[in-house]
Image: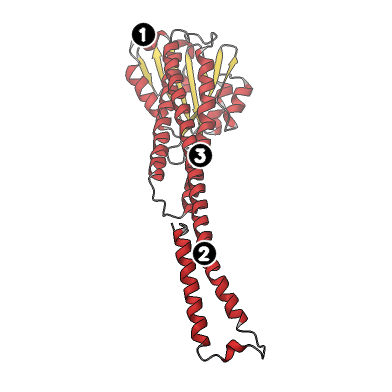
Amino acid sequence: MIRTLAITQEHEVVMNQPLQEMNLQDYTFVWADFSRPTEEETRLLADYFHFHPLAVEDCLHVLQRPKLDYYDDVYFLVLHALRMNDAEPLEVDLFLGPNYLVSYHHDELEEINQAWDWIAEHAGERTIWSKPTVAVAYTVMDKLVDGYFPILFAIEDELGELEGRSSNEPVDELMNQVFMLRSRLLRLRRTFVPMRDLLYRVVHSHRIQGGSEHKLYFIDIYDHLLKLTDMLEADREMTADLRDSYISLNSNRMNNIMKTLTVITTIFMPLTLIAGIYGMNFDHMPELRMKYGYLSVLLFMGLLSAGMIFWFKKRGWFH
């Protein structure tokens, strides 16, 4: 699907005029949004706009790393949106021309719709007329970056809940959740850091027409990405701390189990020795013919066990 938003020379807004019927030179600005385009619609990138083949190829082969390329008077940006349910990156391509902007994406994106609605609402304002291409590019990038925050906040909520979980729960289950969160944070990092580097290039680029006039706006997006990366690194450190805590907890539990088994084994070792001695079948064992020998041995074994238990308890082995 292709939708268009155009501003005429008389500063009137024209919506959804077929792209093939439009002459770009007749308008102050045109935004063409390619959403889930067909092959025929995709061919318009080369046939109608005459974009560089390498840029068109990057649009077709997802998923590209966020970047900024220069092609004569057209600037090509690869951006990433994030799917809310699983934080998977989705590519958004922008072509910034002299008086037009083309957005290209294979998925229906709420952030693009929000930017479209905002531009459609404010298209008649003079602030948009001055540098509409840069203004629209900023709006799209701002909406995409704003969409990162709820995803990271959701992960932080899960981390907070996981941190407050009872230590009596199975450690394996807790460890699996920690590693799942670390994996999701790693996927976010693969989006946040390249996007941060891209915004750094945009902020310090002198080739984008009108970029210097909107530099403060792009710096604001860059600051958001710096905040996101700082939050992400803090969350990764928290997962590392949780992982170490669960490993220590598991080791402590294992030590307690081994200590308990060691105490039980140590108590039964002399009892087993005594039982083994009197279980031998030698003929000349005078204790075997004692009238109260059986009760005496049992009493001695009982006293020996009680004495060992008392001594272990005094040593603090049962704490």
Q: CA distance from mark 3 to mark 2?
A: 34 Å
Report x, y in % for residue 303.
Answer: 47, 74
Q: Nearer the viewer, residue 179 or 197?
A: 179
Up-down relation of residue 123 to residue 249 (above or below): above
Q: Secondary structure at mark 2?
A: helix
Q: Amino acid at mark 1?
A: Glu
Secondary element at image label 1: loop
Q: Where in the figure is residue 141, as x and y percent of width and height?
A: 45, 22
**Residue at 51% in and 23% down:** 196
Q: Position of residue 138 (x, y in %)?
A: 43, 18
Splitting the image into 4 quarters, where does residue 143 fall?
top left
| Residue picked out by circle 2 | 263
> Crowdedness of circle 3 by 10 Å Cα count: few (<14), some, many (20+)?
some
Whether residue 92 is visible here, answered yes or no, is no
Q: Is residue 97 above or below residue 16?
A: above
Indicate which disc, 1 or 3, sits on the residue closer to the N terminus: 1
- The residue under label 1 is 10
The residue pinned by badge 3 equals: 240
